[in-house]
């Protein structure tokens, strides 16, 4: 790039970077690759350090103030920030619509069917952002609705919030209202980081968003993965001339503000119901938490006629999803031993329905968590179930604690093999060090070995694994291959026929693939995706077994920790003995053709993943694509070669169809 840029060229570079941010965050349609953006950004940094006098306030480098605040100052909202009424069922939704129609009839307005703007109800924190002459001047929390707190410095660090509005057709004053959320992927990443660095872990993305905005040091907030979606406006001067709420959203989008892409205009109660069903089905696959949907009468004139009831508009309501939290009683606390010896305390609960599913157990994670939450037998607790993750205990209802209750003490010895438990420096979990000589770990290892993603041994379910281990017939995975029909048939509830079936299943599993075999060994931190990476880059078991740390960390997505785990695993003589026995028993796989990168099937192709996948996790699907040589990006554009669409694929699928991009499904990916 030109080293002697002029001041005008510097200003153009700022505009160019802001334009790219708009394409990325608002249109969800980047026009350049992340690396190109980074290169431009580096150039900007270089120019600004050479010419500090050039720096403009809307430069992306100016998002983070370098001074912490001593406190948050109160901000009075020019127009109050309202709350919403709720409906929890179709009946209540029907009543809501009825109230509106009746009220309009009474006001002599004739509508046969009300048109609504339907939006996801984002589970974050409401904020109001004020622009004057197109510049972001203030951002505030909702507070009590009339007075909030000044969080301008923190909101400016959110990349998707524009520092200046786009174009030149903006009102002199514009207050934008919307929700700050912590996207789910960022939440997971942040918590992993926080655990490692002894920082506070957030209970859920909502707390993540709230906690991050309440940071007095904006440099900290800048490191939190936050996003913003605009959903309405406050004060606008001079008055705007939009007709519908959906027009306001389109207008905000034009001005550079991100609006949630799931927003839709729907007709009447039927339209609302369909929207609710659709969003409920998409919910688990979204990258942000939602707790329902919101319906707003779309016609702004009708909104004015309808007006307000106390603090909420009559023209809008939230349709909430069934609660995913409930209270129940802890009947007992037990500890479980995992495949790698990790000791997890589990609360046995009085059965309770959470979001439509009966929950009887909830994880208490580890010793630190149990101590932090001080969960005791007999306590009444809040339990949460989110998506397909294991239910967890959120907190204790202190007021209901029985008088005689005692704090829970973690055991000092493994409940299964009695070995003394260890806690490794820097790790939160207690571990049983006995490895495969601990029956609990042996059982979990064998289950993992036989699992569908591993050796896929048909007929070997969890119950049978437990019986085989309890009977002393299996002490390592290799023992499975020496079982006899008589031994198996002798187990409880097993007959000749089922014994034969199991042996046939074991025999069949011998023909496998190298990644499956590697995965089935149960090396800590080595999941399906890493097993594929190892196989695709190192080709043979021998090379993988002898690979050194320096070589391993060069592989994609293999970091220091994973590399160490792999090396440690193969340095353990016991493990090598079992592997040799497995190979001697006849386990084998087709050789992996050693292809150069350019020969990979998706070499040079740009691929986008969307929708809910049923077999692969998202990260695994992404890894698989990478291993096939593809470049994986987040949004569909004219440069996309292929879209892998799971279930309930939304706007990206529509876009791909429009652009004639080739579309394939998960089965296709699995078959590659
Ligand atoms: S509209 C006059 N739209 O829900 C209407 N609110 O219970 C004011 N929320 O404090 C709110 N998603 O934090 C609106 N699409 C959406 C929303 C939304 C989430 C939150 C918001 C508000 C609360 C009201």
Image (spheres, rainbow, N blue to C red):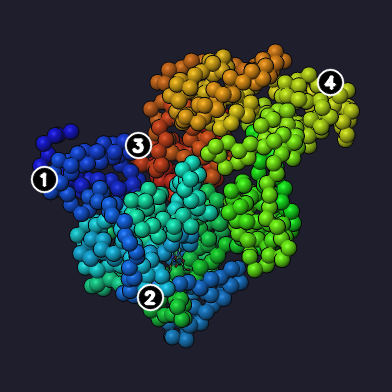
Regarding residue 143, the answer to whether it shows in the image is yes
Helix or strand or loop: what does disc 3 sit on? loop
Query: Which mark, by number, is residue 484?
Result: 4
- The residue that appears at 78% across and 19% down in the rendered structure is 482
Check contact, mark 1 vs mark 2: CB within 8 A.
no
Q: Quadrant of the N terminus?
A: top left
Give me the C-alpha separation between circle 2 and circle 4: 76 Å
Give me the C-alpha separation between circle 1 and circle 2: 43 Å
Q: Which of the pair 351/413 is nearer the observer?
A: 413
Give me the C-alpha separation between circle 1 and circle 3: 33 Å
Percent of width and height locating residue 93:
56, 71
Q: Earlier in the sequence, mark 3 or mark 2?
A: 2
Q: Residues within 10 Å of mark 1 (few under 14, many from 20)?
A: some
Q: Residues within 10 Å of mark 3 (few under 14, many from 20)?
A: some
Percent of width and height locating residue 182:
44, 53
Regarding residue 661, the answer to whether it shows in the image is no
Q: Earlier in the sequence, mark 1 or mark 2?
A: 1
Q: Earlier in the sequence, mark 4 or mark 3?
A: 4
Q: Which of the pair 396/157 is nearer the observer?
A: 396
Q: Earlier in the sequence, mark 2 or mark 4?
A: 2
What residue is shown with label 1? 7
Helix or strand or loop: what does disc 2 sit on? loop
Give me the C-alpha separation between circle 3 and circle 2: 47 Å
Query: Which mark, by number, is residue 146?
Result: 2
């Amino acid at each position: 790039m030109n080293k002697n840029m002029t001041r005008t060229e510097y200003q153009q570079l700022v505009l160019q970077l802001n334009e790219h941010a708009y394409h990325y965050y608002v249109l969800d349609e980047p026009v350049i690759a992340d690396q190109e953006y980074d290169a431009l950004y580096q150039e900007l940094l270089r120019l600004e350090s050479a010419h500090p006098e050039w720096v403009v306030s809307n430069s992306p480098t100016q998002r983070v103030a370098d001074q912490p605040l001593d406190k948050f100052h109160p901000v009075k909202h020019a127009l109050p920030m309202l709350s919403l009424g709720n409906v929890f069922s179709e009946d209540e939704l029907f009543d809501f619509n009825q109230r509106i129609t009746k009220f309009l009839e009474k006001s002599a307005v004739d509508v046969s069917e009300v048109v609504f703007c339907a939006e996801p109800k984002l589970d974050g924190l409401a904020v109001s952002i004020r622009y004057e002459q197109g510049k972001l001047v203030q951002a505030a929390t909702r507070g009590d609705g009339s007075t909030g707190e000044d969080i301008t410095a923190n909101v400016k660090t959110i990349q998707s919030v524009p520092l200046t509005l786009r174009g030149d057709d903006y009102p002199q004053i514009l207050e934008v209202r919307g929700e700050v959320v912590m996207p789910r992927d960022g939440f997971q990443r942040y918590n992993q980081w926080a655990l490692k660095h002894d920082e506070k872990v957030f209970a859920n993305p909502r707390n993540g968003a709230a906690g991050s905005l309440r940071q007095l040091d904006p440099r900290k907030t800048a490191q939190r993965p936050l996003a913003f979606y605009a959903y309405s406006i406050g004060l606008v001067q001079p008055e705007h001339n939009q007709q519908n709420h959906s027009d306001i959203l389109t207008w905000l989008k034009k001005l550079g503000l991100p609006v949630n892409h799931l927003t839709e205009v729907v007709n009447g109660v039927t339209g609302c119901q369909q929207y609710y069903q659709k969003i409920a089905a998409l919910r688990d696959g979204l990258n942000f938490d939602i707790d329902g949907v919101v319906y707003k009468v779309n016609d702004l004139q009708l909104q004015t006629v309808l007006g307000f009831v106390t603090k909420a508009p009559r023209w809008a309501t939230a349709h909430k999803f069934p609660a995913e939290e409930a209270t129940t009683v802890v009947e007992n606390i037990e500890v479980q031993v995992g495949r790698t010896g990790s000791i997890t305390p589990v609360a046995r609960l009085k059965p309770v329905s959470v979001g439509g599913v009966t929950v009887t157990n909830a994880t208490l994670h580890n010793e630190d968590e149990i101590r932090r939450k001080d969960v005791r037998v007999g306590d009444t607790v809040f339990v949460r179930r989110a998506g397909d993750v294991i239910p967890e205990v959120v907190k204790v209802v202190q007021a209901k604690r029985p008088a005689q209750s005692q704090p829970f003490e973690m055991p000092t010895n493994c409940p299964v093999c009695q070995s003394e438990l260890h806690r490794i420096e820097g790790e939160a979990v207690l571990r049983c060090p006995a490895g495969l000589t601990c029956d609990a770990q042996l059982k979990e290892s064998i289950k993992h070995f036989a699992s569908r993603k591993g050796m896929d041994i048909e007929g070997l379910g969890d119950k049978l694994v437990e019986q085989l281990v309890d009977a002393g017939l299996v002490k390592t995975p290799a023992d499975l291959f020496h079982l006899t029909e008589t031994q198996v048939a002798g187990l409880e509830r097993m007959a000749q026929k089922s014994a034969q079936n199991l042996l046939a299943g074991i025999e069949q599993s011998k023909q496998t693939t190298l990644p499956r075999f590697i995965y089935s060994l149960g090396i800590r931190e080595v999941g399906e995706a890493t097993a594929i990476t190892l196989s695709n880059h190192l080709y043979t078991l021998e090379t993988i077994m002898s690979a050194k740390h320096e070589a391993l960390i060069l592989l994609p997505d293999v970091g220091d920790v994973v590399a160490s785990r792999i090396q440690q695993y193969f340095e353990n003589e016991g493990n090598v003995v079992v592997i040799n026995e497995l190979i001697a028993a006849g386990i084998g796989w087709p050789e992996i053709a050693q292809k150069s990168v350019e020969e990979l099937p998706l070499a040079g192709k740009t691929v986008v993943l969307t929708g809910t996948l049923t077999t692969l996790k998202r990260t695994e699907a992404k890894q698989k694509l990478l291993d096939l040589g593809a470049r994986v990006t987040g949004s569909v554009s004219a440069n996309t070669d292929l879209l892998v669409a799971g279930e309930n694929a939304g706007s990206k699928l529509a876009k791909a169809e429009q652009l004639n991009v080739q579309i394939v499904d998960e089965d296709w990916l699995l078959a590659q």
